[in-house]
Amino acid sequence: MSSSKNLDAKKTSFLNKSNSAFIEQMYLKFINKDPELPQSWKDYFKDLNEDSNLIINEINGPSWQRNKKLIKMKLKKKILLKKKNMIQSKILTNRIETLSEQLH
């Protein structure tokens, strides 16, 4: 392997599947111009000369993917329904206990 390839490999050796979520977070900070992003990450992403729209689309997943907002809304609705059922169950339990006490 040539020395330039060794140098390239050394510069990108941290890029692997096990830390891809972390790198994705750093890139999102980069495109959102987060002031807390370390300068080394800013320089790294700047030097890539990548089209940020393409990368953002990649991060968001395929266009045919189910709408994440819809999924979140359905999940919230499910949680609210479960809470409502629990409250109704407690109310019924209290009513039954009250009636039971009144009968005795």
Image (cartoon, rainbow, N blue to C red):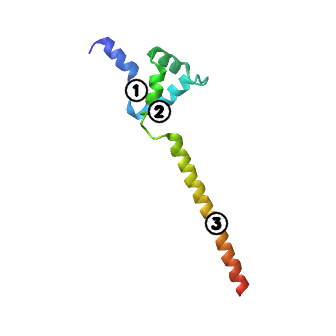
Query: Which tag, 1 or 3, sits closer to the chain's start?
Result: 1
Residue type highlighted by circle 3: Gln
Find the distance from the CA under tag 2 to the CA under tag 1.
19 Å
Which mark, residue 15? Answer: 1
Q: Which mark is residue 94?
A: none
Element type at mark 3: helix
Q: Nearer the viewer, residue 44 or 51?
A: 51
Quarter of the figure with residue 4? top left
At label 1, counting other C-alpha atoms closer than 10 Å, the crowd grade (few under 14, some 14-19, many 20 or more) is few
Residue located beneath label 2 in the image: 60
Query: 13 or 95, which is in the foreground?
Result: 95
Which disc number belongs to residue 88? 3
The percent coordinates of residue 16 (x first, y second) are 38, 29
Q: Residue at x 46, y 18 (%)?
A: 51
Label 2 SS: helix
Relative to 99, is 24 above or below? above
Quarter containing the N terminus: top left
Q: Residue at x 44, y 16 (%)?
A: 48
